[in-house]
Amino acid sequence: MNVESEVKLDIELAAGYLKMPQSRVQGLLNKRLLLQNWDDYQHLFRFDKNISKIEHGSVLYQKDGSFELIRGFPKIQRAMLLGSAINDHFSKIGSVVVEEKMNGYNVRVAGIDGRIAAITRGGLVCPYSTERAEYLIKPDFFTDHPDLILFGEMAGPDNPYVPKDIYGIESLEFFVFDIRHKGSGKPYPVYERRKLAEEYGFTQVRLFGEFPTSHAADEIAEIIRELGKIRHEGVVIKDPQMVLHPIKYTCSQSNCADLRHAFRYYNDYGRDYFFSRVVREGFQSVEWDENESELQKRCLQLGESILHPMVDSIRQIKDGKRISDDVQIRVRDIAVASRFEEYLRRLGVDAVFEAPQQVGDEYLVKIRKLNQSTNDKTESMCKGELW
Ligand code: ATP
Ligand code: MG
């Protein structure tokens, strides 16, 4: 029997809650724009695209005869020229708050039916992130505030999506950067959010300070240069009241690190991913008014980030090896590793899980992500196929 079909969405009730005609909700289900989760979470329905005002990745579920909606995390637009973007975007407010942009993956943690669930950007409950969240976050936050959602970045080396060794984290930490209400998605103002997070002892993203809008760009450029030196990613610039949308800006070193990773698996990444990162370098060089030798250095760094990893991959594949992206997770309950394996399989990620190694009271599981497309493409080129 197919267990997944047991839970059905009450379309009439859902339509009432979403203020949509029933036919529209039915249409979303038919077109698979409103998708059902599985296993313990089959009563959660996720929006696979932006629908009216509901963001992609929003999660809808029935609760006490009505519904609850966990809104997706809104896209953060990027400043290309810091000075112009800040002046334009924040012209109505006197000052902006600057927080560190951590490089990991976005997770929403919510209390659902008395349990903690960690939801990834697309609206799926990730078994691995959920176990980490249960371990890292005291559940009393959700008993005290059942209508709040924590938004944060899961960062550190035991990370199946974006492993980074740059933060001095031993395994994986959850850095809170937003607290929002269920339903409306209304965010807490920055200082209230930081205070609340502190009360519960949560790890938070670093706060660099609040700067007058008129000269924030200079301060931020300084912060960016320093963050670049320690290979951190960048900053998110926010309206202290969280009424205007935040904007982001990243360090050149981080763009190059992304390129180094992506070009190793050049055929598995979308072309936009490469292009946008190259364009950022152009804008930063102009904004920082670089002289010939500074520009030369940037050219070299950019070129090396593209060619070195790619040449390395081609060489290996030409020599008959298969390349893989090696990541690892650390679990307390060994069953979580199997659930995570199944989860990746359902998402269509080709990954090989190695045998778990016991480390203290936890298990380390190495995972090889296979990047078939880069392997296959390169292999056929090496055999003489034309592009
Ligand atoms: P986007 O989130 O803008 O759709 P994206 O998924 O490519 O784009 P990034 O370029 O990494 O993401 O930038 C946005 C992400 O940065 C957020 O989704 C969030 O996960 C992460 N982030 C890290 N630190 C912060 C912070 N201090 N405030 C807000 N977001 C942060
Ligand atoms: Mg990111």
Image (cartoon, grey):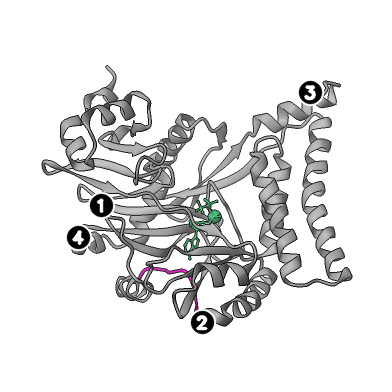
Q: Earlier in the sequence, mark 4 or mark 1?
A: 4
Q: Earlier in the sequence, mark 1 or mark 3?
A: 1
Residue type of the residue flagged with mark 2? Phe
In the figure, is residue 277 to the left or right of 170?
right
Q: Is mark 1 within 8 Å of ligand 1?
A: no
Q: Is mark 3 within 8 Å of ligand 1?
A: no
C-alpha span from label 2 to label 3: 54 Å
C-alpha span from label 4 to label 2: 36 Å
Q: Mark 4 sits on what residue?
A: 143
Q: Mark 3 sits on what residue?
A: 380
Q: Mark 2 sits on what residue?
A: 211
Does residue 385 sit above or below 147 in this rendering? above
On whether residue 33 falls in the magenta region, the answer is no
On whether residue 211 falls in the magenta region, the answer is yes
In the figure, is residue 14 to the left or right of 134?
left
- Residue at (51, 42) in percent of width and height: 356
Q: Are dots 4 and 3 in contact, CB under 8 Å?
A: no
Q: Mark 1 sits on what residue?
A: 183
Q: Is mark 4 within 8 Å of ligand 1?
A: no
Does residue 299 sit above or below 367 in this rendering? below
C-alpha span from label 4 to label 3: 56 Å
Does residue 2 sit above or below 335 in this rendering? above
Q: Earlier in the sequence, mark 2 or mark 3?
A: 2
Q: Residue 75: where, in percent of width, then height? A: 47, 53
